[in-house]
Image (spheres, rainbow, N blue to C red):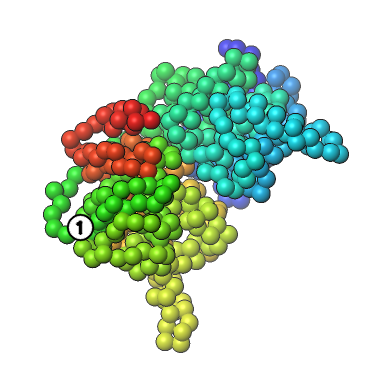
């Protein structure tokens, strides 16, 4: 084996009542691209925190970096050894510009009393050039899309003398082209003997970029395998201990009055001449590259981004949706792309998040919330959606990504929606949690709810929708019936359009 950059032996970490890691042995060679996978709660995040020195392992662990053994390994040791972590939340400063965020580490390291804006811009431009992107340097990070924010975080990491780059879910919001650009950068870093630890729920991407893959399950190491010896199916089985199978979602040809009909819906710079129908029990997929207008269309239907022209009909009746409240009154529910910002109040309890959309239904004759009714509602949703939480009063931010998404679903299911729009319903969620979310979606459709699923993962919409529309530059450019097409045909169409 090539020279080791990192060697960890017998690494354990126990929190109150939870064994997060149990005697893990883990090694990465210099210049290696190594994948790390596992379900939510498998121990991936804890292992990353120990590698970066944020958390200290329990007694008995041995950690060596470039042959140097550490008795008390801390974050300063990690920094001095050139270990950079890009966490899923990006840790950017939304009130600073793109250039300021990218150059921040070098600006601080210079210890200059005065800031050279030319140098700031030069650092940012060089970093962006390495992954072949262009983002306005003076743009505020808060105004960027999630995809561009991810790219800014990656650029910032590349400005330091990095030796090990840890990427935690780096492609969650990136397009196929942006993913390929990132992979080009990772391979370029590898040619300079820079090591990469690639952590992702997107198993096809892990197998594409990583040379070896380490699998964790319930805090234990299942094994480390050459990626050439793995498939999506085998990797899924090793992660979960179960075989996850997909069956096509098929329904009889819809007839009668549609639940939702959209005619020539347009908004300048967002989408144009959108026409489609959604029938009870349908799961309609919308896919396409980021920037295709998918999210803007969803937000228009939910009153967050009002269309300028065109018609929206609910059960044959023309309506106007000018606000979220009007959308809700028409029986529309909406799961947003970014659950942590738009879908949940992260500091609030699981209970409060579940009932936030139906508080008016819980008021008693004294104009106060009926505690028993509230409790029954919360317990019912938790049981129905199998939400795993230590307590109903636990902050929702303490839950895994999959359970957070179930809470988002719970708060809208409680409104008894007729139409349910889900934008990226499984972003940042592991394979087993994805499967359970998909099952919830299908069960809702079986009950007669009309569902729109928006995703940039063609496999997700193909396996879970009866129809798929492809959007490009704000227009619907194709429609497929999943029973009469293939996943490859849809992906090829998207690639040709781009």
Left or right, 292 with respect to 443, comes to right
Quarter of the figure that contains the N terminus: top right
Q: Residue 385 appears at what percent x and percent y?
A: 37, 56
Residue 323's spot in the image, x, y percent? 42, 65
Tally the marks: 1
Residue 364 appears in which quarter of the rendering?
bottom left
Please state the horizontal and vertical placement of residue 474, each as a whole percent of the image: 37, 43
**Which residue is located at x 52 percent, y 57 percent?**
396
Task: Please tell me which residue lies in front, 351 or 114.
Answer: 114
Furthest-bottom residue in this view? 366
Residue pushed farthest right? 113
Q: Which residue corresponds to mark 1?
A: 258
Write down the quadrant of residue 197 in the picture: top right
Q: Residue furthest top?
A: 1
Quarter that holds the C terminus: top left
Q: Residue visible at 21% across and 55% down?
A: 279
């Amino acid at each position: 084996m090539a020279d080791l950059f990192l060697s960890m032996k017998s690494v354990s970490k126990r929190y109150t009542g939870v064994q997060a890691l149990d005697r893990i042995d883990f090694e990465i060679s210099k210049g290696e691209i190594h994948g790390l996978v596992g379900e939510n709660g498998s121990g991936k995040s804890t292992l990353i925190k120990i590698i970066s020195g944020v958390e200290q392992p329990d007694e008995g662990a041995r950690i060596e970096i470039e042959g140097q053994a550490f008795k008390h390994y801390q974050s300063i040791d990690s920094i001095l050894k050139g270990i950079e972590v890009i966490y899923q939340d990006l840790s950017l400063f939304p009130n600073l510009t793109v250039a300021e965020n990218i150059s921040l580490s070098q600006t601080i390291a210079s210890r200059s009393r005065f800031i050279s804006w030319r140098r700031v811009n030069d650092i940012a431009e060089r970093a962006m050039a390495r992954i072949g992107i262009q983002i306005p340097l003076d743009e505020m990070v808060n105004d960027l899309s999630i995809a561009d924010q991810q790219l800014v975080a990656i650029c910032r990491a590349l400005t330091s003398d990095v030796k090990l780059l840890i990427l935690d879910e780096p492609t969650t919001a990136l397009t196929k082209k942006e993913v390929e650009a990132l992979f080009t950068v990772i391979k370029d870093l590898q040619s300079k003997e820079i090591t990469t630890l690639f952590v992702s729920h997107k198993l096809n991407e892990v197998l594409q970029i990583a040379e070896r893959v380490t699998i964790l399950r319930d805090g234990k190491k299942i094994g480390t395998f050459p990626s050439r010896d793995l498939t999506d199916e085998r990797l899924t089985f090793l992660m979960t201990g179960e075989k996850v199978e997909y069956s096509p979602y098929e329904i009889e040809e819809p007839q009668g009055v549609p639940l939702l009909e959209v005619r020539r819906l347009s908004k300048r710079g967002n989408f144009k001449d959108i026409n489609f129908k959604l029938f009870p029990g349908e799961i309609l997929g919308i896919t396409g590259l980021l920037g295709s207008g998918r999210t803007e269309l969803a937000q228009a239907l939910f009153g967050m981004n009002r269309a300028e022209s065109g018609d929206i009909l609910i059960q044959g009746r023309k309506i106007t949706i000018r606000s979220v409240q009007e959308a809700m009154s028409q029986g529309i529910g909406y799961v947003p792309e970014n659950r942590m910002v738009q879908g949940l109040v992260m500091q609030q309890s699981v209970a409060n998040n579940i009932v936030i959309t139906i508080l008016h239904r819980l008021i008693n004759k004294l104009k106060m919330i009926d505690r028993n009714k509230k409790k029954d509602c919360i317990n019912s949703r938790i049981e129905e959606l199998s939400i795993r939480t230590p307590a109903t009063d636990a902050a929702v931010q303490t839950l895994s990504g999959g359970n957070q998404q179930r809470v988002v679903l719970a708060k809208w299911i409680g409104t008894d929606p007729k139409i349910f729009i889900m934008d990226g319903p499984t972003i940042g969620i592991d394979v087993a949690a994805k499967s359970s979310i998909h099952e919830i979606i299908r069960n809702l459709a079986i009950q007669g709810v009309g569902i729109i699923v928006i995703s940039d993962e063609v496999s997700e919409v193909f396996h879970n929708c009866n129809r798929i529309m492809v959007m490009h530059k704000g227009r619907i450019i194709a429609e497929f019936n999943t029973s009469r097409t293939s996943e490859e045909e849809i992906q090829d169409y998207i690639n040709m359009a781009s």
